[in-house]
Image (cartoon, rainbow, N blue to C red):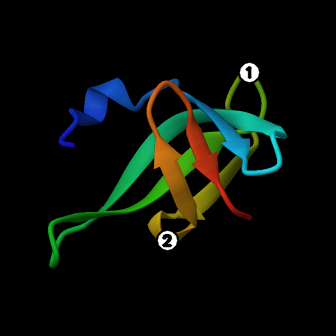
């Protein structure tokens, strides 16, 4: 299913164990391949702490994003 990048911003990110990690703050693309490379997750409300999660760790994306970390 195709989605707009703008729809991914601010989605909540959880581990496959159900632990809340944060919200999508940024998206990283692979220019050469034209694909999503990673999501950057804000771990706090102000976005001062962030974690980059590679695309390969994303397990599902709908109303929330599930990742294995």
Quarter of the picture holding the C terminus = bottom right
Q: Are marks 1 and 2 in contact (CB under 8 Å)?
A: no
- Give the residue pinned by disc 1: 45
Real-space CA distance between mark 1 and mark 2, rounded to the nearest whole angstrom? 25 Å
**Residue at left 84%, top 40%?**
19
Return the x and y of residue 67 as percentages of the image width and height.
Answer: 63, 54
Where is residue 66 shown, x and y percent of the image? 61, 46
Of all residues, the one furthest to the bottom in this rendering is 32
Q: Nearer the viewer, residue 51 or 3?
A: 3
Left or right, 49 with reference to 4: right
Residue 17 percent across, percent down from the top left: 83, 49
Picture quadrant of residue 62: top left
Quadrant in the rendering for residue 51: bottom right
Of circles 1 and 2, which is in front?
2
Numbered label attached to residue 56 = 2
- Left or right placement of residue 14 versus residue 40 in this view: right
Q: Quadrant of the N terminus?
A: top left
Identify the residue shown where x is 60% and y is 59%. Answer: 52
Q: Residue at x 52, y 24 (%)?
A: 10
């Amino acid at each position: 299913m195709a989605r707009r990048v703008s729809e991914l911003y601010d989605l909540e990110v959880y581990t496959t164990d159900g632990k809340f990690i944060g919200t999508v703050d940024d998206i990283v693309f692979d220019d050469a391949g034209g694909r999503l490379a990673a999501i950057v997750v804000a771990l706090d409300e102000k976005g001062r702490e962030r974690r980059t999660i590679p695309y390969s760790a994303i397990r599902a994306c709908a109303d929330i994003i599930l990742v294995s970390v």
